Amino acid sequence: MTMQTTKRPASSMKTAIEKAAAKPRETKIGKVIALLDRKDGATLDEMVEATGWLPHTTRAALTGLKRKGHTIERDKRDDKACYRITKSA
């Protein structure tokens, strides 16, 4: 039994490639970095809500960012821990 493959026309391949190149891929760690880059930073709850990760996974991601050279500062905001990037890698 053989499977037939359909080939796309070259013009549709170009548009798919152009679309991929035009729109940067949004990642969860990218969302975390964007939240941490804000002036007020982000609480753990805000990062969990943005990514859908569990709190321990989010804290592990912060540790990973530190290992990659980011400097993350921890402050208090409304009696909650607030994190922000003070120096990027």
Image (tube, rainbow, N blue to C red):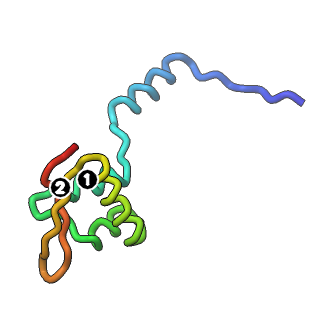
Q: Which of 52 and 77 is in front in this view?
A: 77
Quarter holding the C terminus? Answer: top left
Q: Mark 2 points at which residue?
A: 85
Q: Which of the marked residues, 1 or 2, is nearer the chain's N terminus?
A: 1
SS at badge 2: strand
Q: How far apart are marks 1 and 2 (CA)?
A: 8 Å
Horizontal side of residue 7 vs 59, given as left or right: right
Horizontal side of residue 54 vs 44, given as left or right: right
Disc 1 residue crowd, few under 14, some 14–19, many 20+, Cα 10 Å: many
SS at badge 1: helix
Amino acid at pointer 2: Ile
Q: Are marks 1 and 2 in contact (CB under 8 Å)?
A: yes
Which residue is pictured at 39% across the width and 31% down the height?
19
User: Residue furthest toward the bottom?
Assistant: 79
Mark sitting on residue 33 = 1
Which residue is pictured at 59% across the width and 23% down the height?
8
Q: What is the x, y in percent for residue 69?
A: 25, 47
Q: Splitting the image into 4 quarters, where does residue 54 fall?
A: bottom left
As drawn, 44 above or below 63: below
Disc 2 residue crowd, few under 14, some 14–19, many 20+, Cα 10 Å: many
Q: Splitting the image into 4 quarters, where does residue 45 fall?
A: bottom left
Amino acid at pointer 1: Ile
Q: What is the x, y in percent for residue 3?
A: 80, 29
Quarter holding the N terminus? Answer: top right
User: Residue furthest toward the left?
Assistant: 39
Q: What is the x, y in percent for residue 26?
A: 35, 46
User: Residue furthest toward the top?
Assistant: 10
